[in-house]
Amino acid sequence: MFAILKKEIRSFFASPIGYLVIAIFLLLTGLAIWVFKGEMNILDNGFADLSSFFTLAPWIFIFLVPAITMRSFADEKKQGTLEILLTKPVSVIKIVLGKFFGYFLLILLALLPTFIYVYSVYQLGNPIGNLDTGSIIGSYFGLVFIAAAYTSIGVFSSSITDNQIVAFVIGVFLCFFMYYGFEGLSEYNILGNFHPESLGMDYHYSSISRGVLDINDFIYFLSITTFFVLLTVPMVRNRRIQKKDYLKISVVLIGLLILNYLIGTFLYARYDLTKDKRYTISTATRNIVKEIESPLVIDVFLEGDFPSGFRKLKNETKQLLEEFNLYNRDIIFNFIDPLEDVSTRESNIENLVKRGMQPMQISVQENGKSSQELMFPWALASYNANTVKIPLLKNKIGAGQEELVSNSIQHLEYAFADGFKKLISERTKKIAILKGNGQLKDIYLTDFLSSIREHYNIAPFTLDSVQNNPDRVLSQLQDFDLIISAKPTEMFTEEEKQVLDQFTMNGGKSLWLTESIIIDKDSLYNESGTAIAIMRDLNLNDFFFKYGVRINPEIVKDMYSAPITLAMGDGSDAQFQPLQWPYDPLAASNPAHPITTNLNRIRFDFASPIDTLKNAVAKTILLKSSDLSGLQGVPSTVTLDIVKEEADPAQFVKGPQNLAILLEGTFTSVYNNRILPYKSSEFKNESIPTKMMVISDGDVIKNEVVNGKPQQLGFDRWTGQLFGNKEFLLNAVNYLLDDDGLINIRTKEIVIPFLDNQKVAEERTKWQFLNIGLPLIILGLFGFVFNYLRRRRYS
């Protein structure tokens, strides 16, 4: 066998056709991914990966491999040397395997110069070395599997004819059909749960090409290779298949199918070689996906001619949905371009906007000209007549394209898992919106309440009956899983506090958005432009103090703040201008916690600082002001004239101030070792493990109201900025009520490696020459040395 292998390699490199075939492969690959404009161009895409190479290579292999293998047996038959070979003391199967491994090794040798691509991307990364080597190693494994399967097909094609051209054509056809042909058959699937595309190489190569090794894919390629190698044996022995061979071939085919079925059903092993494990679906997501029992159809509107960053988002979305489909075949997805048909373009835009899916304007470069186009970074998921919208773009104030793409890709799994949960899960959790203590009216909570209503049952709840029957009120309150008190302005009685305390002791969760001062922006809009900030007493100081926090009666001022929009000028010359307003801190979020990971800045309005106190309850600071913060005591005067003054740095030296704190653990009752406001036979001094969140500004949850219509929470209509208030609060509620750990997906860190664009621009020609010229030079040097040594040996 080894003699046959060496003979095939020597004869291949002894002919100029062999060098020509490999040179064409290297030239086509190099031009496609380094020079030609388009989606495949690595330098234009700006991402430090070789996904375009691993996408293109199988298609070039369809022609390369048959061109290499076409003479394996066809030439032997034509020259009449096959009979001589068969007389040697080597079995037919060993002859076939000797040629197979010889040509397989040749293809691997043709791949070696492409390692220059890896070096180039490594050097062009930002920073240098910003490359996911695990993914690339896995992808090369995929090419090795493809090469083995194609080689077996090519050798078989050569064994059924004595004409090399005919062998080449048959090989190309069979390779194409085995790689992509079954995709077309999937449209005519009449076999129920069986999916014809799973018989195709593309289906199994797609996951390997991104760095995920699955034992099912390995067994599949091994089976294809084995089948065509065994199919070649009777063709070499008899030149055509005899009747007795059909039985053997049928047995082998059925055996391989059974092997693939058994391994796919009972033996599951999957290895995600990517550095950040981006294709490893979390346990919480898998549990949700497995609950889907009927078709869940996802329409993704990321189809069109987009810049490279959004193409990357599209590809990552597709790959994630393919991962979902591996776990549950009922997940079906389509990519749609709603703007492709000019006749329906306007109606499609109108319908999507009505559903709450706002378009995004992007800049498209074409023929040296820049134009503005619309795109809809959304998906619609439908399940049992219910539909939810899923945002695919995770915007962030001031983020560039690289950060925007990274944030969005990191957010994808949670976005889809959250959407699936809305569709398949019944709303069993209940939320009580506290009323009766001067909390915000519903119109100021409209956007927030309409959003959480998709997940949970919500209802207003008042404590008015506490004076008459506190035990009954507590019993009713315990039917809820979470209470939300949004900006209370009236004092809580001791009896009300005991009810709320016992709700916590019994495991109830709570979200408090409260303030310790009386001042808001509306009170400044008067002739003098001033208002007095005074302390607000809600009788909750001992309540929070016992749990481990204290809201101080001060105002946080921050150099890093949202602007206030005021009319500047007189009469008709007045113009609205955004001006620096230190009383609206833009809070920085805790990147290590799932509630606040990857969030826009959260806008506060006259917030107070929160101190933490030592006790057994675990405390996590979720939001805080910037390092350039100051404190203003009360009572004090607040005036709009501050926007005309230059900020005094000496007033902003207090450092970051805590604005939102999460409390978790076992709480001690506020009334432990105290006289109870009312007697209760079921009074508890210590809670079961529970959670509470305290935010020192009620306006965080307040949406604007314009002409009687509530606006989107967190959206500033004057500057067009969207702050992270809504997403923060939704995450907070999900975390407080999350029993399956879904919210923890948000902490999954996915790193998208980018190229150094400046280096690419300055050294573009150098790297193009290196990746096109150097492989050809290496091939030429190899040919020169090989033939020199050959002539020297045989001269």
Image (cartoon, rainbow, N blue to C red):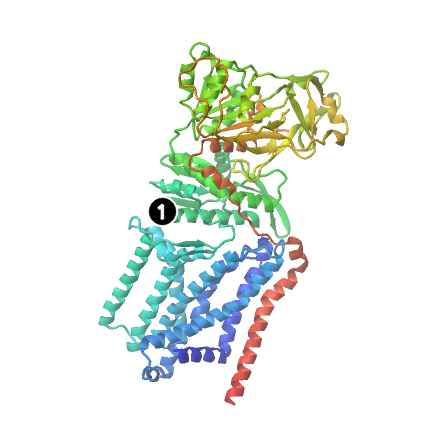
Q: Is residue 329 left or right of residue 748?
A: left
- Residue under the point 34% across and 63% down: 223
Q: Amino acid at mark 1?
A: Arg
The N terminus is located in which quarter?
Answer: bottom left
Number of numbered discs present? Answer: 1
- Residue under the point 56% across and 48% down: 309
Residue situated in front as seen by the camera: 341 or 41:
41
Residue situated in front as seen by the camera: 137 or 504:
504
Q: Is residue 404 left or right of residue 7?
A: right
Residue 634 on image: x %, y %: 68, 19
**What is the residue that sits farthest to the bottom in this orientation?**
795
- Residue under the point 55% across and 36% down: 596
- The residue tagged 1 is 329
Residue 732 in the image: above or below residue 310: above
**Image quarter of residue 517:** top right
Residue 300 on image: x %, y %: 46, 43
Q: Badge 1: how crowded within 10 Å, few (<14), some, or many (20+)?
A: some
Residue 256 in the image: above or below residue 68: above
Residue 656, visible in the rendered structure: yes
**Image quarter of residue 298:** top left
Residue 370 on image: x %, y %: 63, 47
Q: Secondary structure under badge 1?
A: loop
Residue situated in front as seen by the camera: 710 or 789:
789
- Residue under the point 29% across and 63% down: 253
Residue 575 on image: x %, y %: 71, 26
